[in-house]
Image (spheres, rainbow, N blue to C red):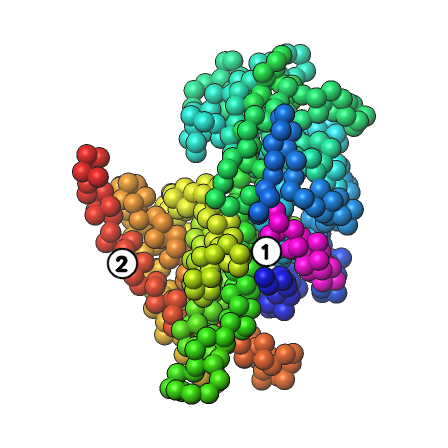
Amino acid sequence: MSTYAAPLKDMQFVIRELVGLDDITAMPDCAEVTVDVVDAVLEEASKFAAEVLDPLNRGGDQQGARLADGKVTSSRGFKEAYQQFVTGGWNGLSGRAEYGGQGLPHVVAMPVAEMWNSANLAFSLCPMLTSGVLEALTLRGSPAQQQLYMPRLTSGEWCGTMNLTEPQAGSDLSAVRTRAVPEGDHYRIRGTKIFITWGEHDMAENIIHLVLARTPDAPEGVKGISLFIVPKFLVNPDGSLGAPNDVKCVSIEHKLGIHASPTCVLSYGDGKGAIGYLVGEENRGLEYMFIMMNHARLGVGLEGVALAERAYQHAREYARTRVQGRAIGQKSGDRVTIIHHPDVKRMLLSMKAQTEAMRALAYTASAALDKSRHHPDDKERRRNQALVDFLIPIVKGWCTESSIEVASTGVQIHGGMGFVEETGAAQYLRDARITTIYEGTTGIQAADLVGRKVGFEKGATAFTVLDEMRKIDGELARSKNADVAAQRDNLERAVDALNGATQWVVATFPKDPDAAAAVSVPYLKLCGTVAGGWLMARAALVAESKLAAGEGDADFYRAKIATARFYAEHILPQANGLASEVVNGAASVLALAEAQF
């Protein structure tokens, strides 16, 4: 079993050179964030990930969470690790300072979260959901609610969840049936919620559930949904804990992966009814919940990056130590480790290249998020918000889909041993499989992308991003490094393919939304693939300049250039096939009637 080591050099490279840490720190709200501060945070986080979280990952997968009498006991060592996590101040890394947080920008919090996810995905899901609750309360909670709940959520003393799904509803939130009946200054909540990640556990003293429910006079459909705070333990005005609320975990799911993360069925109101408190206004709950969902979708996309990195590290270490066969053309002599075999190198490079491209895209989205909130110029805030909105479904959909491919390749590198649980390679594939499903399946992300983010705004943001991609063509043409210059033609063709597919979506969506929806997933994958190639080419240009100046680690920069060329030659060519699928493939998707399947 390999030990996780955070890829600090690559994280620092992306933050400084690709997303522009200087641009972030130039904003008044982020002026105290220096390169030294970022490096110190990442270094300490890497130690916590490697020394505390990673050692619990394998045991947590094997043991899992356990339910007895409505109480969930976390896997061995998780509760103690969570207390260390809270004591170390990690939960409040990007939290607001007035509630005890450190106020660091998302572009710093993202690589830290990547480390948690790589080292122990099941553990990291708990604080990720808490951060989503904080996001929702920050933007829509009343001042009293913020004062009562946010300090302890920020510190991590309390955890948070979001409760959307019900047995009959699935992703169709218009079918939510949980009821909320007004009673004085609160509501009585009754209903059942399923798939609630960390919905019950013993790691924190209280859990703050955000629950979607309908009031008695609410209109049908999504317009009649409201959002409520429902604590596991009621909270007194002074912040102390009161009586248990009427909410109970009735079962936890038996899952393919993330075994140490309890996925709960929660029953509200088996007795007098659970006490809940309205967030914002009635019938605006779905609007508010999307605050959490967008936050979570970016976080889930990052989980794809993290699992790909962990699977890559695991496969790389196995390839370095597994002795099998002789070098090609040699009939005698010592056998070699499999990393010497060309096809194993190809597989490792595919894992490395895709992971680096995914990381660059996720961090780019996080930098845009920071600018959308903290840039002093309103026009820049709005421009970056549009970019965030466009990128989130791509980061969520493409990074998670790619993580399954990367983790599967990791199993392949292990050969038959990869299919055996003892090597650990299979866990990353099992864990990755859920990421394309929760917080909205890839199909839901793609529908959002072609509908709201491209079709509705007639491709305005997409075409702006395409213009940015074209700007590096001249730099690639002038490059004196053959490996950098070689990326130009494939990138140009890929950008043209995305441009043509985007024009098709813009023209087709208003008159035939079914056709656009039929090829929305290929379009999403096309966006991610081309954006990844653009960012990898940018990375290669930076690496070339560093080598020319004699700066930094020459081997790192040479590897960066070689990996970018591999992406351009082995992954970017997929763009033409995906674009053809988008432009030509809708009719065949819609060709069969229900009875013909």
Where residue 433 appears, x then y in whole percent?
A: 46, 48
Q: Which residues are magenta?
A: 40-60
- As drawn, the label of residue 580 is 2
Left or right: residue 459 versus residue 336 is left
- Residue sitting at 57 percent across and 47 percent down? 62
- As drawn, the label of residue 118 is 1
Looking at the rendered structure, the kind of residue marked 2 is Ser
Secondary structure category for the residue under label 2? helix
Where residue 339 appears, x then y in whole percent?
A: 48, 75
Locate the C terminus by quadrant.
top left
Left or right: residue 178 versus residue 75 is left
- Residue sitting at 19 percent across and 34 percent down? 595
- Residue sitting at 27 percent across and 55 percent down? 581
Left or right: residue 62 versus residue 327 is right
Q: Quarter of the image holding residue 331?
A: bottom left
Is residue 156 inside the magenta stretch?
no
Outermost residue to the right: 238
Q: Nearer the viewer, residue 583 or 439?
A: 439
- As drawn, the label of residue 294 is none
Q: Nearer the viewer, residue 515 or 268?
A: 268
Q: Nearer the viewer, residue 233 or 331?
A: 331
Is residue 387 something that shows in the picture? no
Q: Mark 1 or mark 2, which has the lower sequence index?
A: 1
Secondary structure category for the residue under label 1? helix
Q: Quarter of the image holding residue 80?
A: top right
